[in-house]
Image (spheres, grey):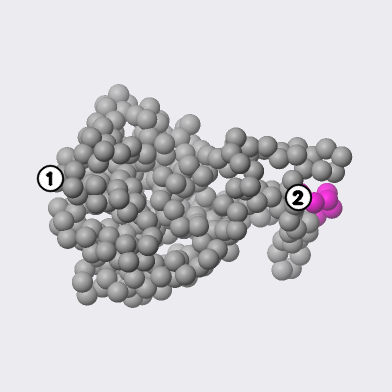
Amino acid sequence: MQPENLSPVECLRAVFLASLITVLREPIPRVRFWRKGKDHALAISHDVETLRGLDSGSARLLKVEQQLQVKSTWNVSSQRYPLSSRTLGRMAETGEVGAHDTKHDGRLLFLRSEEMVDRVRSCKTHLERLAGRNVKGFRAPLLQHSSRLLKAVGKAGYDYDSSIPSWEWLSPTSLHPHGIGTVFPLSLMDTLEIPISLPQDHQLVRVAGLSPEEAVDRLEAISSWVKGLGGACVLLVHPDYEFAEDRHIGQYVRLLEKYRDDSKCDVMTLGEMSEWWKKRQSFSWKIEDGAVDARSESRNEEFELRLVTGYGKDGFTEEGSDW
């Protein structure tokens, strides 16, 4: 995976900002992407595909996350395997539960629009009844996505969707490399989309043929690049595959420790990421008499406003700004 595949949108963003700075020769204000004091973010997510993953794999991954005191999002199918309030409650206590369709049969994308809405809504309703909590997000099986499905997710009452990869080697739908090309959340079809910015464990191990240790090395390298952009590292690890096995669980620990020990990393669930990004989207400002007047529906102290003052061979230069 090369940066030009993962995030060409960010390359264009940098070129555009550098052009403005060079031509205008005046500071340009911008709101930093994450909560004050943080440079980048991480959202850990798990798609539960099998009963084995639900029963044993999830327990191993949960134990690691509890020990490291990090939270994750568990995307669960509502009709693929037996579910209980106890199982979903355990996931919700240390993170959150997300929806992963009803049967995980790959048919969702081919339904009529009305059937799509009914199906993803029924998944949400069933999971909420068992978990006793609001289910905020949706991720489609096989990372299927389309404009119709995004509209259906919004109509069904979800706060966000997270079904589109930034880039992956092999799309199960098209059987070709595929991705949206950004490592930041964005609004699509009136729905917030949070791209899966890091290659999922299945692609690294089962498609690219890496060992779990090599896969962690690759994830760390790509995470470093996303961190440099100030982006969102969205990690997808299945409890059904290698990282949840006893012999490889140490590699999962090694991966998460890197994020936990990074004081500049804003570790949050996908639901929390959605909530934060919508707050950030509500932020606005205007410049009067050389002063920046910042406005937001949230407390201003949550945000960090910077002035981009120049661009050179070492990249952008910035200064802090008083509101």
Between residue 151 and residue 48, name the one nearer to us: 48
Q: Residue at x 60, y 58 (%)?
A: 37
Chain-order first, disc 2 or disc 1: 1
Task: Answer whether residue 112 is visible to the viewer in this image.
Answer: no
- Label 2: few (<14), some or many (≥20) within 10 Å? few
As drawn, the residue found furthest toward the left would be 82
Amino acid found under the numbered disc labelled 1: Pro
Q: Secondary structure at mark 1?
A: loop
* Relative to 53, 223 lies left or right: right
Q: Is residue 245 above or below residue 81?
A: below
Magenta-span inclusion, residue 181: no
- Residue on which the image places disc 1: 82
* Relative to 15, 67 lies left or right: left
Task: Answer whether residue 15 is visible to the viewer in this image.
Answer: yes
Q: Residue at x 71, y 68 (%)?
A: 314
* Relative to 231, 135 lies left or right: left
Q: Which residues are magenta?
A: 22-28
Determine which quarter of the picture holds residue 99: top left
Determine which quarter of the picture holds residue 123: top left
Between residue 62 and residue 169, name the one nearer to us: 62
Q: Residue at x 63, y 37 (%)?
A: 296
Q: Residue 126: where, in percent of width, then height? A: 22, 35
> What distance separates the C-alpha of mark 2 from that of mark 1?
54 Å
- Residue on which the image places disc 2: 322
Q: Residue at x 50, y 68 (%)?
A: 262
Amino acid found under the numbered disc labelled 2: Asp
As drawn, the residue found furthest toward the right would be 289
